[in-house]
Image: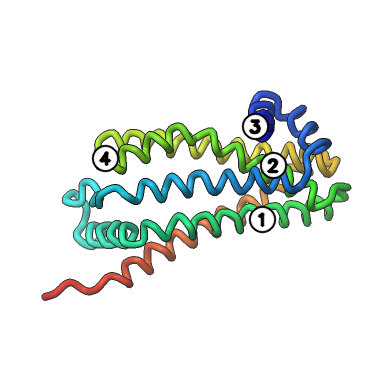
Amino acid sequence: MFLWADLVELVRHPFSGFGLIDGRRRLAEGLAALALSLALPAALSELAALGPFRPPANLGSLPSLTAQGADMYARWVYQNRFVLPVYGLLFSAGLWLLAAGLIHAIARALRGRGDFRGYLKLVGYTAFVGVITLPLVIVDTGLKIQGNTSLESQIGQLLGLLGLAIFLWQNTLLVLAARRHYGLSTERAVAAVVGPAGVVLVLVVALIILAVVFAIIAQPSPAL
């Protein structure tokens, strides 16, 4: 499938890769790339949900209230483990669409010449770069099914570092895509991307905090 060839080209030569995608690919293909980037990790999360419950590590070293909250949150996540990947997929799709819309609005305000459909196509391919982590995610999924907590912790740390690197690289690609598609200078393309990226990041952090709070509230009080 040409999506994978486009991914290799985009990773190796992002400037010429975006030129090829912008000129030859259709919006449907960009949306397919976005859908795959979200659906594949969600499917692996559903498989990982088959694994046993794993309580948080080192609860005894935490203050009592913190340990109780961490344990409640872990149990809530386990109880909703088959539903959360679906919510995560829908939430991530909404974030990518929101980011594309905000960047388009700012880019046009900065006198960019591109259209939303064309930029959304490039956003889909930018999200598709995230599938680079899939080999590690597959290993992590197998360890979760087996209940191998020691190796799972190491792979999880590696995934966290790789995820941060992919996040930074995707934001760089969004800048390159905005510069290419809207005909902006690098400075204006950075300005168009940084604001929406900050908004999305704040939303993610706020929703994570709300999820933790609601998970703790939803747990029944311990019997006295």
Q: Residue 174, percent across and down?
A: 69, 42
Q: Which residue is situated farthest in the left direction here?
A: 224
State left or right for residue 46 relative to residue 151. Answer: right
- Kindly identify which numbered label has been placed on residue 174: 2
Tell me where residue 161 sits by quadrant: top left
Report helix, strand or loop for mark 3: helix
Quadrant into which the N terminus falls:
top right
In the image, farthest residue toward the top:
12
Look at label 3 and name its amino acid.
Leu
Q: Earlier in the sequence, mark 2 or mark 3?
A: 3
Residue closer to the observer: 3 or 118: 3
Question: Mark 1 or mark 2, which has the lower sequence index?
Answer: 1
Residue at point 14%, 74% (across, down): 223
Closer to the eye: label 4 or 3: 4
Q: Which residue is mark 4?
A: 146
- Quadrant containing the C terminus is bottom left
Res. 191 in view: no
Q: Residue at x 72, y 56 (%)?
A: 102
Residue 33 vs 79, above or below: the answer is: above
Task: Give the mark nearest the N terminus, 4 or 1.
Answer: 1
Q: Nearer the viewer, mark 4 or mark 2?
A: 4
Q: Which residue is mark 3?
A: 7
Q: Taking the image as drawn, is residue 9 in sight?
A: yes
Q: Nearer the viewer, mark 3 or mark 1?
A: 3
Helix or strand or loop: what does disc 2 sit on? Answer: helix
Front label number (2 vs 3) = 3
Q: CA distance from mark 4 to mark 3?
A: 32 Å
Q: What amino acid type should be assigned to the residue bearing mark 1? A: Leu
Residue where numbered disc 1 is placed: 97
- Distance from disc 4 to disc 1, alpha carbons, whole Å, reads 36 Å
